[in-house]
Protein backbone atom coordinates (compact mmCIF):
# COMPACT_ATOMS: atom_id res chain seq x y z
CA UNK A 1 0.00 0.00 0.00
CA UNK A 2 1.45 3.29 -1.04
CA UNK A 3 2.37 5.60 1.73
CA UNK A 4 0.73 9.00 1.80
CA UNK A 5 -1.18 11.44 3.89
CA UNK A 6 -3.49 9.91 6.44
CA UNK A 7 -7.17 10.11 5.66
CA UNK A 8 -7.75 11.04 9.27
CA UNK A 9 -6.77 14.63 10.00
CA UNK A 10 -5.72 15.52 13.50
CA UNK A 11 -7.53 18.48 15.12
CA UNK A 12 -5.79 21.72 14.29
CA UNK A 13 -4.43 23.76 17.12
CA UNK A 14 -5.93 26.78 15.41
CA UNK A 15 -9.46 25.36 15.10
CA UNK A 16 -11.98 28.02 16.26
CA UNK A 17 -13.40 27.36 19.69
CA UNK A 18 -16.50 29.01 21.10
CA UNK A 19 -15.27 31.76 23.35
CA UNK A 20 -16.98 32.82 26.54
CA UNK A 21 -18.49 36.29 26.37
CA UNK A 22 -16.26 39.00 27.83
CA UNK A 23 -16.81 39.82 31.47
CA UNK A 24 -18.16 43.22 32.57
CA UNK A 25 -14.69 43.96 33.92
CA UNK A 26 -13.11 43.24 30.55
CA UNK A 27 -15.68 45.35 28.76
CA UNK A 28 -15.23 48.25 31.17
CA UNK A 29 -11.49 48.10 30.66
CA UNK A 30 -12.08 48.61 26.94
CA UNK A 31 -14.59 51.36 27.65
CA UNK A 32 -11.86 53.34 29.41
CA UNK A 33 -10.15 53.44 26.00
CA UNK A 34 -13.26 54.83 24.32
CA UNK A 35 -14.41 51.51 22.83
CA UNK A 36 -18.07 52.15 21.94
CA UNK A 37 -18.68 48.53 20.97
CA UNK A 38 -17.52 47.42 24.40
CA UNK A 39 -19.85 49.97 25.98
CA UNK A 40 -22.75 48.59 23.95
CA UNK A 41 -22.00 45.15 25.40
CA UNK A 42 -21.75 46.60 28.90
CA UNK A 43 -25.03 48.43 28.35
CA UNK A 44 -26.77 45.15 27.51
CA UNK A 45 -25.43 43.56 30.70
CA UNK A 46 -26.20 46.38 33.10
CA UNK A 47 -29.26 48.27 31.82
CA UNK A 48 -31.76 45.70 33.10
CA UNK A 49 -30.43 45.39 36.67
CA UNK A 50 -29.99 49.16 36.93
CA UNK A 51 -33.53 49.87 35.72
CA UNK A 52 -34.93 47.29 38.13
CA UNK A 53 -33.17 48.83 41.12
CA UNK A 54 -34.08 52.41 40.18
CA UNK A 55 -37.72 51.51 39.55
CA UNK A 56 -38.04 49.90 42.98
CA UNK A 57 -36.89 53.18 44.53
CA UNK A 58 -38.70 55.71 42.35
CA UNK A 59 -41.94 53.82 41.59
CA UNK A 60 -42.25 55.71 38.31
CA UNK A 61 -41.33 54.00 35.05
CA UNK A 62 -40.68 57.13 32.98
CA UNK A 63 -38.48 58.80 35.59
CA UNK A 64 -36.72 55.48 36.26
CA UNK A 65 -35.81 55.12 32.59
CA UNK A 66 -34.46 58.66 32.59
CA UNK A 67 -32.32 58.02 35.67
CA UNK A 68 -31.10 54.74 34.20
CA UNK A 69 -29.81 56.58 31.15
CA UNK A 70 -28.07 59.09 33.42
CA UNK A 71 -26.39 56.24 35.29
CA UNK A 72 -25.16 54.58 32.10
CA UNK A 73 -23.78 57.88 30.83
CA UNK A 74 -21.96 58.31 34.15
CA UNK A 75 -20.50 54.81 33.79
CA UNK A 76 -19.21 55.72 30.32
CA UNK A 77 -17.68 58.95 31.59
CA UNK A 78 -16.21 57.54 34.81
CA UNK A 79 -15.12 54.09 33.64
CA UNK A 80 -11.52 54.87 34.56
CA UNK A 81 -12.58 55.48 38.19
CA UNK A 82 -13.56 51.85 38.72
CA UNK A 83 -11.39 49.93 41.15
CA UNK A 84 -11.62 46.15 41.31
CA UNK A 85 -10.51 46.33 44.95
CA UNK A 86 -13.93 47.75 45.85
CA UNK A 87 -15.98 45.02 44.17
CA UNK A 88 -17.09 43.96 40.72
CA UNK A 89 -18.41 46.17 37.93
CA UNK A 90 -22.06 45.28 38.51
CA UNK A 91 -21.86 46.20 42.19
CA UNK A 92 -20.13 49.46 41.30
CA UNK A 93 -22.78 50.29 38.70
CA UNK A 94 -25.66 49.51 41.07
CA UNK A 95 -24.07 51.70 43.74
CA UNK A 96 -24.07 54.60 41.28
CA UNK A 97 -27.69 53.79 40.36
CA UNK A 98 -28.81 53.72 43.99
CA UNK A 99 -27.18 57.09 44.68
CA UNK A 100 -28.73 58.64 41.57
CA UNK A 101 -32.18 57.30 42.43
CA UNK A 102 -32.02 58.60 46.01
CA UNK A 103 -30.88 62.00 44.71
CA UNK A 104 -33.88 62.08 42.36
CA UNK A 105 -36.28 61.18 45.20
CA UNK A 106 -34.91 64.06 47.26
CA UNK A 107 -35.06 66.41 44.27
CA UNK A 108 -38.68 65.51 43.47
CA UNK A 109 -39.68 65.91 47.12
CA UNK A 110 -37.92 69.26 47.40
CA UNK A 111 -39.67 70.50 44.25
CA UNK A 112 -43.03 69.38 45.62
CA UNK A 113 -42.35 71.10 48.94
CA UNK A 114 -41.31 74.32 47.18
CA UNK A 115 -44.49 74.30 45.11
CA UNK A 116 -46.63 73.77 48.20
CA UNK A 117 -44.87 76.58 50.07
CA UNK A 118 -45.22 78.86 47.06
CA UNK A 119 -48.96 78.20 46.87
CA UNK A 120 -49.43 79.00 50.53
CA UNK A 121 -47.22 82.08 50.26
CA UNK A 122 -49.25 83.29 47.29
CA UNK A 123 -52.37 83.01 49.40
CA UNK A 124 -50.81 84.94 52.25
CA UNK A 125 -49.57 87.65 49.89
CA UNK A 126 -52.09 87.82 47.03
CA UNK A 127 -51.85 89.90 43.88
CA UNK A 128 -51.46 93.67 44.45
CA UNK A 129 -51.47 92.97 48.22
CA UNK A 130 -55.23 93.47 47.97
CA UNK A 131 -55.91 91.39 51.07
CA UNK A 132 -53.69 93.67 53.16
CA UNK A 133 -55.27 96.89 51.88
CA UNK A 134 -58.89 95.74 51.73
CA UNK A 135 -60.04 92.49 53.34
CA UNK A 136 -57.89 92.93 56.45
CA UNK A 137 -58.84 96.57 57.04
CA UNK A 138 -62.53 96.83 56.13
CA UNK A 139 -65.48 95.70 58.20
CA UNK A 140 -67.36 92.50 57.40
CA UNK A 141 -70.48 94.26 56.10
CA UNK A 142 -68.59 96.21 53.44
CA UNK A 143 -66.79 93.03 52.40
CA UNK A 144 -70.14 91.22 52.16
CA UNK A 145 -71.50 93.94 49.88
CA UNK A 146 -68.34 93.85 47.78
CA UNK A 147 -68.50 90.06 47.49
CA UNK A 148 -71.96 90.35 46.00
CA UNK A 149 -70.38 92.06 42.99
CA UNK A 150 -68.43 88.90 42.14
CA UNK A 151 -69.54 85.99 40.01
CA UNK A 152 -70.55 82.82 41.82
CA UNK A 153 -67.35 80.99 40.92
CA UNK A 154 -65.25 83.96 42.07
CA UNK A 155 -67.07 84.07 45.41
CA UNK A 156 -66.56 80.35 45.90
CA UNK A 157 -62.86 80.65 45.07
CA UNK A 158 -62.35 83.55 47.49
CA UNK A 159 -64.33 81.79 50.22
CA UNK A 160 -62.29 78.60 49.94
CA UNK A 161 -58.94 80.34 49.61
CA UNK A 162 -59.23 83.13 52.16
CA UNK A 163 -61.83 82.00 54.65
CA UNK A 164 -61.17 78.26 54.70
CA UNK A 165 -57.42 78.36 54.05
CA UNK A 166 -57.40 76.12 50.96
CA UNK A 167 -54.40 76.18 48.62
CA UNK A 168 -54.88 76.93 44.93
CA UNK A 169 -54.62 73.21 44.20
CA UNK A 170 -57.23 72.33 46.82
CA UNK A 171 -59.60 75.01 45.51
CA UNK A 172 -59.14 73.63 42.00
CA UNK A 173 -59.97 70.11 43.17
CA UNK A 174 -63.13 71.24 44.98
CA UNK A 175 -64.38 73.27 42.02
CA UNK A 176 -63.14 70.78 39.39
CA UNK A 177 -61.19 73.33 37.34
CA UNK A 178 -57.48 73.68 36.46
CA UNK A 179 -55.15 75.32 38.99
CA UNK A 180 -54.21 78.02 36.46
CA UNK A 181 -57.87 78.94 36.03
CA UNK A 182 -58.32 79.24 39.80
CA UNK A 183 -55.33 81.57 40.09
CA UNK A 184 -56.77 83.78 37.36
CA UNK A 185 -60.25 83.83 38.93
CA UNK A 186 -58.89 84.72 42.36
CA UNK A 187 -56.72 87.48 40.91
CA UNK A 188 -59.67 88.94 38.99
CA UNK A 189 -61.91 88.62 42.04
CA UNK A 190 -59.43 90.48 44.24
CA UNK A 191 -59.18 93.27 41.70
CA UNK A 192 -62.97 93.56 41.56
CA UNK A 193 -63.13 93.53 45.36
CA UNK A 194 -60.55 96.28 45.56
CA UNK A 195 -62.48 98.39 43.08
CA UNK A 196 -65.83 97.70 44.79
CA UNK A 197 -64.51 98.43 48.25
CA UNK A 198 -62.79 101.54 47.01
CA UNK A 199 -66.07 102.80 45.60
CA UNK A 200 -67.71 102.37 49.02
CA UNK A 201 -64.93 104.08 50.98
Image (tube, rainbow, N blue to C red):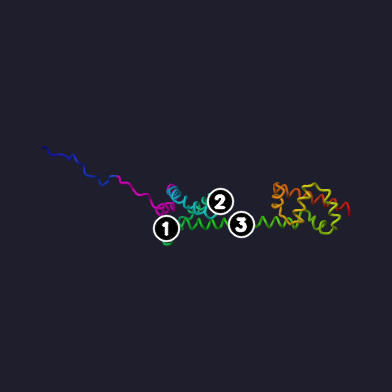
Name the residue at 28% across, 45% down: 15
Name the residue at 84% across, 57% down: 140
Q: Is residue 195 left or right of residue 120?
A: right
Name the residue at 19% across, 41% down: 8
Disc 1 on helix, strand or loop? loop
Q: Do residues under tags 1 and 2 come within 8 Å of each other at their CB atoms?
A: no
Q: Where is mark 2, residue-wise?
A: 60
Q: Is residue 21 inside the magenta stretch?
A: yes
Q: Which residues are magenta?
A: 16-37
Q: Can you tell which mark lies on residue 109? A: 3
Image x and y of residue 129, in percent: 78, 56
Depth check, front residue: 196 or 94: 196
Q: Can you tell which mark lies on residue 88? A: 1
Q: Is residue 82 left or right of residue 9?
A: right
Disc 2 on helix, strand or loop? loop
Quadrant hosting residue 122 = bottom right
Marks 1 and 2, how far apart at CA: 28 Å
Amino acid sequence: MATGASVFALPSATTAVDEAPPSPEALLSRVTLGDEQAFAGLYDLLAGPILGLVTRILRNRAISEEVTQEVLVEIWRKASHFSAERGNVKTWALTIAHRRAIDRVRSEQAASDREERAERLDLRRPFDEVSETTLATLDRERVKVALSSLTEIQRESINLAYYKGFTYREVAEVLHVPVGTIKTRIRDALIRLRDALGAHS
